[in-house]
Image (cartoon, helix red, strand yellow):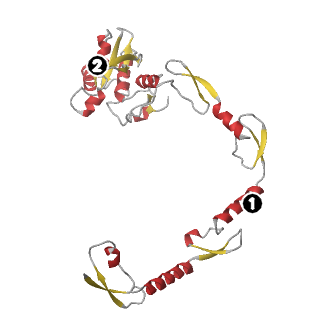
């Protein structure tokens, strides 16, 4: 047991007390600020009065009683929640009536709330049950849904196929978008795709971008595979790849559809895989790297203005 000597926070006298370092509440006992309970009570009362004296006095606009608020609440007008409820109810009765039209039954009604849309809870519930019919953008199947919800696709299967076709805008990098220098430009996902399309236009060979989506089954799961380009002359597809398949996580991610492509090739389709370094090396060999206009690989900074998210 230790004897601790401290100075009282209120009266300033020195007092002693026994302290045991172990046991419940030992830490609080060591931080004891007052010598007796009388000093503790007196000091707390003085602090409370000091806090009240620092507050500003206000008069409640509802009941007329005097109350105190901190400086940060100097704009407060009401003393309690009860007065606030009464004051709000009186203010609501003073508001003028607005003539509105019900969005459901089209009957005119009066309301003090200008943002009100329905004349009754019955009309509100009826509006929640209203439906409209839309067509799926992939399979053209009719979709019956709420008026407040406008879906583009009827199922996850169609959503995945639309994503494979490029119908859903994917923010994979900063170079995706339409190209203003290409007439009827598709929404390219990379500058490599845009440069390949410019090369085809330069040699008078216009391909179709994401022409067809193939449905394949990999490990018992249905997958969608959409090659980047289709050439009608020769009836072959072209798949563009930024890097070759390797052991790195990045290369595996970019070549994640390799098995789907191999399955489509095994079914009799002709698909050429063009890698980015090989493509630009071939342009150098043919003397076209500095000939084709607006080639983005030649200068990314000066061609950035050609990219837009809207056609």
Q: Residue at x 26, y 76 (%)?
A: 21
Nearest the viewer among 118 and 8 is 8
Q: Going by the image, does 150 lie left or right of 287?
A: right
Q: Quadrant of residue 204?
A: top left
The label number, if any, that marks residue 239 in the structure image: none
Q: Residues within 10 Å of mark 1 (few under 14, many from 20)?
A: few
Nearest the viewer among 107 and 183 is 107
**Which residue of the protein is positioned furthest toward the left in this rendering?**
247
- Spot occupied by residue 71 in the image (x, y as percentages of width and height): 56, 72
Q: Going by the image, does 260 lie left or right of 139?
A: left
When the figure is inspected, residue 102 is found, relative to residue 243, above or below; the finding is below
Nearest the viewer among 202 and 79 is 79
Q: Nearer the viewer, mark 2 or mark 1?
A: 1
The label number, if any, that marks residue 273 in the structure image: 2
Q: Residues within 10 Å of mark 2 (few under 14, many from 20)?
A: some
Q: Going by the image, does 114 lie left or right of 25?
A: right
The label number, if any, that marks residue 90 in the structure image: 1
Q: Quadrant of residue 263?
A: top left
Query: Helix, strand or loop at disc 1?
Result: helix
């Amino acid at each position: 047991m230790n004897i601790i000597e401290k100075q009282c926070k209120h009266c300033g006298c020195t007092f002693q007390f026994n302290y045991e370092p172990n046991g419940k509440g030992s830490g609080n006992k060591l931080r004891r600020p007052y010598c007796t309970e009388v000093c503790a009570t007196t000091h707390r009362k003085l602090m409370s009065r000091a806090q009240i004296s620092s507050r500003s006095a206000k008069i409640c606009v509802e009941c007329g009683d005097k109350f105190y608020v901190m400086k940060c609440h100097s704009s407060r007008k009401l003393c309690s929640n009860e007065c606030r409820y009464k004051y709000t109810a009186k203010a609501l009765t003073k508001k003028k009536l607005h003539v509105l039209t019900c969005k459901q039954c089209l009957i005119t009604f009066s309301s003090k709330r200008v943002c009100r849309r329905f004349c009754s809870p019955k009309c509100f519930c009826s509006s929640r049950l209203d439906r409209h019919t839309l067509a799926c953008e992939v399979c053209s199947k009719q979709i019956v849904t709420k008026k407040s919800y406008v879906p583009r696709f009827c199922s996850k299967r169609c959503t995945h196929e639309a994503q494979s076709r490029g119908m859903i805008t994917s923010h994979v990098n900063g170079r995706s978008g339409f190209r203003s220098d290409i007439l009827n430009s598709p929404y390219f996902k990379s500058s490599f795709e845009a440069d390949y399309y410019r090369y085809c236009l330069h040699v008078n060979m216009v391909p179709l971008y994401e022409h067809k989506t193939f449905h394949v089954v990999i490990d018992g799961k249905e997958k969608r595979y959409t090659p980047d380009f289709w050439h009608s002359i020769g009836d072959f597809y072209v798949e563009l790849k930024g890097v070759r398949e390797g052991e790195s996580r990045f290369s595996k991610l970019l070549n994640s559809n390799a098995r789907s492509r191999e399955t489509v090739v095994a079914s009799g389709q002709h698909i050429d895989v063009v890698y980015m370094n090989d493509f630009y090396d071939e342009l150098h060999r043919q003397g076209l790297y500095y000939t084709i206009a607006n080639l983005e690989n030649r200068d990314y900074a000066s061609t950035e203005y050609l990219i837009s998210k809207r056609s």
